[in-house]
Image (cartoon, rainbow, N blue to C red):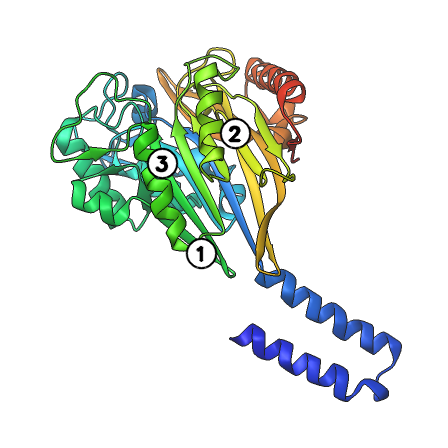
Amino acid sequence: MRIIMYKFILLTVLFVGLIKLSNAQQDTLVNTLDSIQNVSDKMSLLFIGDIMGHGPQILSAYDSETETYNYDTVFYYIKNVLSEPDFTIANLEVTLAGPPYKGYPQFSSPDALALAGKKAGTDVFVTANNHCCDRGLQGINRTIEVLDTLKILHCGTFKNLAERQSNNLIVLEKNQIKVGLLNYTYGTNGIPVPKPAVVNLIDRKLIKEDIEIAQKDSLDKLIVFLHFGTEYQSEPNTEQINLVNYLFNQGVDIVIGSHPHVIQKMVYLPADSVNKERFVAYSLGNFVSNQRKTQTDGGVMTRIVLKKENGKTRIEEHNYILTWVYKKKRTGDVYDYFILPAAEYEDKKDFFSDSVDYEKMKLYIENSGQLLNKQNVDVKELK
């Protein structure tokens, strides 16, 4: 309402007082009006990959003096990037099931991990992944309860069917733009989903029904976040590609992927005479983990800016930011973990206490650049 009033006032001044204004003053008023319009019709989104909690990460976060956990330092060098967009969305690939805290193969991390993510700027966690049933019904329920207590939006797993029917679709709204988010996983590592909990599994019939329901909500864009693909494979497999194409054919606008623990290509396709514009990031890789094999020690953040003009919303910007996990020795078997925006530290060798770590990051940047420069379609790095 305030923006509409400002426009009315400016238009009144512009037209009623037009004769009295110089050319420079007229230009100033027009530019001011344009700037108000630009502020009011954009939404920025940032998608980040797997937030994991291996045993060494849990040990790193523990303070023996206070007997508490704190993960704030993990996000210290990346929090400015995470907090800048209107909405930052991440894959939470652990349960918050309470103690005993354990890493692989059945994860339960301290609540402090989710809290630190929120404090750094994460707004939404998708929770449907192959580890969501690691701690059974208690793990699913307590994860939901912790996220609710922290006031963090989430989707993908639910306490029961009634909750799914109410909360399956997350709706994000900003500046007159309305976006929907759905989340599904290929499986749960062979662990049956404990009743009455519900986990969104990848099933085309189910997803189609969810899309049809979502489309009744007058959305500007619909996003589906998928946990799928083959672990440690840098190219999407045929099943991934076919599923993404199916979703596009059903009306989905943006598809974001996780699970392989390495990054895969991103594709932007503009609208044509048959199709509307589409965007897919097949795998964002690891945002933070203890995995250190080649290409598992980092990930990619996908940044999308939506713009609404004349009632139509389009993707105005679509790019990516490489991230790398700096595992720095603290003492004995204890390490500190820092997520770094890779490009920012590419030429800061002195920042690293060990030149070996710097070379590992450089290798990650080089390998990632070769992959994405070759396979991406109209999606460039933002430095």
- Nearest the camera: 310 or 182? 310
Q: CA distance from mark 3 to mark 2?
A: 20 Å
- Nearest the camera: 207 or 94? 207
Q: Amino acid at mark 3?
A: Lys
Using a 10 Å C-alpha cutoff, classify the residue at mark 2 as few (fewer than 14 neighbours), some (14 to 19) or many (20 or more). Answer: many
Using a 10 Å C-alpha cutoff, classify the residue at mark 1 as few (fewer than 14 neighbours), some (14 to 19) or many (20 or more). Answer: some
Q: Amino acid at mark 2?
A: Ala
Q: Residue 197 vs residue 173: left or right?
A: left
The residue beneath circle 3 is: 208
Marks 1 and 2 close (CB-CB < 8 Å): no
Residue at x 41%, y 16% (from the top left corner): 291
Residue at x 30%, y 24% (from the top left corner): 59
Looking at marks 1 and 2 on the same chain, the residue that comes earlier in the sequence is marked by 1
- Nearest the camera: 64 or 124? 124
Residue at x 47%, y 23% (from the top left corner): 285
Q: Measuring from the top left, give residue 130's x and y in whole percent.
A: 29, 23
Can residue 9 be seen here? The reply is yes
The residue beneath circle 1 is: 173
